[in-house]
Image: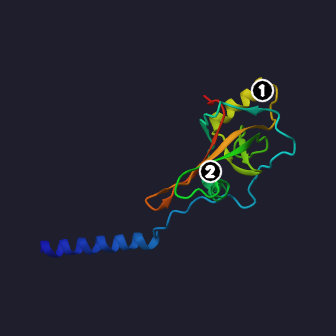
């Protein structure tokens, strides 16, 4: 008798699990897509108002590069198995029209968007622009596209490092 009850409980459990799986199939988690017709900042036609420098230390990194890895790979150029350290002139543009971040600062290399300053860094950067009496104007600094070396047979990600005084 106890064997029959155990068998019935096991069968009911199996049916319940089957019903749950059937009604809510596991779906592969999808990467969030940038909305179609999404906002894309533009590089202004005016020359940068100021060139920043921190003596070649390159301590500020650009964020959101994952969307721009193909662009960064092209900008890095041929560097074999070793990591790249390709120099560029970066243009930093306070992005007044960004619908997602009201204090965004967009970073361009060679006329191509490669990411943004981190939100807290963007606020501090904008304070520096105000102190210099050039708010909302594009400025420049030296930059490097770094990374992309081979490790265990796979190409590592690229990053952009800016020659700006740390934004802290």
Q: Note whether 98 is above or below 11 in the view shown.
A: above
Rendering coords of residue 154 (x, y %): 48, 61
Question: Along the horizontal axis of the image, is 108 left or right of 63?
Answer: right
Answer few, some or many: residues within 10 Å of disc 2's Cα (few below 14, many 20 plus, some between 14 and 19).
Answer: some
Question: Which type of secondary structure does the marked residue at label 1 adopt?
Answer: helix
Residue 116 placement: quadrant: top right
- Residue at left offset 66%, top offset 30%: 54
Which numbered tag is attached to residue 65? 2
Q: Assign the C terminus to one quadrant of the image.
A: top right
* Circle 1 residue: 130
Residue nearer the viewer, 4 or 71: 71
Percent x, y of residue 117? 66, 40
Residue at 30%, 73% (x, y): give it: 14
Q: How is the image coloured?
A: rainbow
Residue 20: give x, y in percent of width and height: 40, 69
Distance, label 1 to label 2, CA atoms, is 27 Å
Q: Residue furthest top?
A: 131
Total marks placed:
2
User: Disc number at residue 61?
Assistant: none
- Residue drawn at x 69%, y 31% as measured from the top left: 53
Q: Nearer the viewer, residue 86 or 167?
A: 86
Q: Tell me which label, 1 or 2, sits earlier in the chain.
A: 2
């Amino acid at each position: 008798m106890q064997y029959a009850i155990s068998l019935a409980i096991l069968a009911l459990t199996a049916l319940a699990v089957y019903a749950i799986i059937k009604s809510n199939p596991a779906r592969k988690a999808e990467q969030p897509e940038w909305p179609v017709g999404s906002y894309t900042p533009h590089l202004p036609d005016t020359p940068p108002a100021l060139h920043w420098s921190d003596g070649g230390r390159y301590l500020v990194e650009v964020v959101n590069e994952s969307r721009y890895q193909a662009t960064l790979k092209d900008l890095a150029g041929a560097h074999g198995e070793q990591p790249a350290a390709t120099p560029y002139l970066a243009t930093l543009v306070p992005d007044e029209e960004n619908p997602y971040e009201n204090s965004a600062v967009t970073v361009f290399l060679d006329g191509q968007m490669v990411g943004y300053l981190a939100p807290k860094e963007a606020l501090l950067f904008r304070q520096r622009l105000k102190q210099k009496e050039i708010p909302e104007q594009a400025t420049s600094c030296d930059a490097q596209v770094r990374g992309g070396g081979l490790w265990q047979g796979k190409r590592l990600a690229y990053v952009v490092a800016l020659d700006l005084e740390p934004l802290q």
